Image: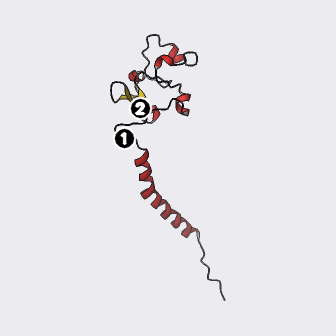
Amino acid sequence: MPDKSPVLSRRHLIKALGATMGIYVSRVRPQERADTAPSATPTISVDPNSPRATLLGFVTDHQQADQVRWQKKRGDVDGKQQCQSCALFNPTDANVGTCAIFDDRQVPAAGWCHAWTES
């Protein structure tokens, strides 16, 4: 009696994989984006202890920046380098705004990080 077990060809495998990915992209991915996309009024603030913030020397008060480690801040004798005067800062009200470096999360206007760029 001949063996009637199904044979999976490469073509069948690729079709099945394509169908699976199509379902994933059309159903799962949009839900993930909706959950993680920044809203018009973000409520998530940057955690100063997060890896990115630590790497960039982020502080919530520019006067607390480590001027020994960050030569850029050491040269800021007049205190101009603050989030509110950075080209990457987008103010949302008088005391906070969003920052492109931190995925549009909230940062205080008086904060500072090494990514500060003159606007």
Query: In the image, what residue type sits under mark 1?
Result: Ser
Task: Pick whichever, 112 or 117, lies toward us.
Answer: 112
Going from the N terminus, do you reach mark 2 or mark 1 first?
1
For the residue carrying disc 1, how many other residues have a C-alpha within 10 Å: few (<14), some (14-19), or many (20+)? few
In the picture, measured across the screen, residue 9 lies left or right of residue 73, that is: right
24 above or below 112?
below
Answer above or below: position of 99 versus 112: below
* Residue 73: image location, x then y, percent: 50, 17
Image quarter in which the C terminus is found: top left
Looking at the picture, tell me which residue is in the foreground, 34 or 24.
34
The mark tally for this picture is 2
Which residue appears at 40% of the width and 48% of the height?
34
- The residue depicted at 43 percent of the width and 11 percent of the height is 78
Q: Is residue 119 visible?
A: no
Q: Which mark, residue 106?
A: 2
Q: Quadrant of residue 97?
A: top left
- Measured in 3D between alpha carbons, the distance from the residue under mark 2 to the one under mark 1, in whole angstroms, is 11 Å
Q: Quadrant of the N terminus?
A: bottom right
In the displayed structure, 75 sits above or below 5; it is above
Q: Which residue is mark 1?
A: 39
Residue 99 at x, y = what percent? 42, 31
Q: Is 47 or 56 nearer to us in this picture? A: 47
Percent position (x, y) of residue 83? 42, 23
Secondary structure category for the residue under label 2 = strand
Q: Residue at x 40, y 25 (%)?
A: 87
Residue 109, x across and y down, in percent? 40, 24
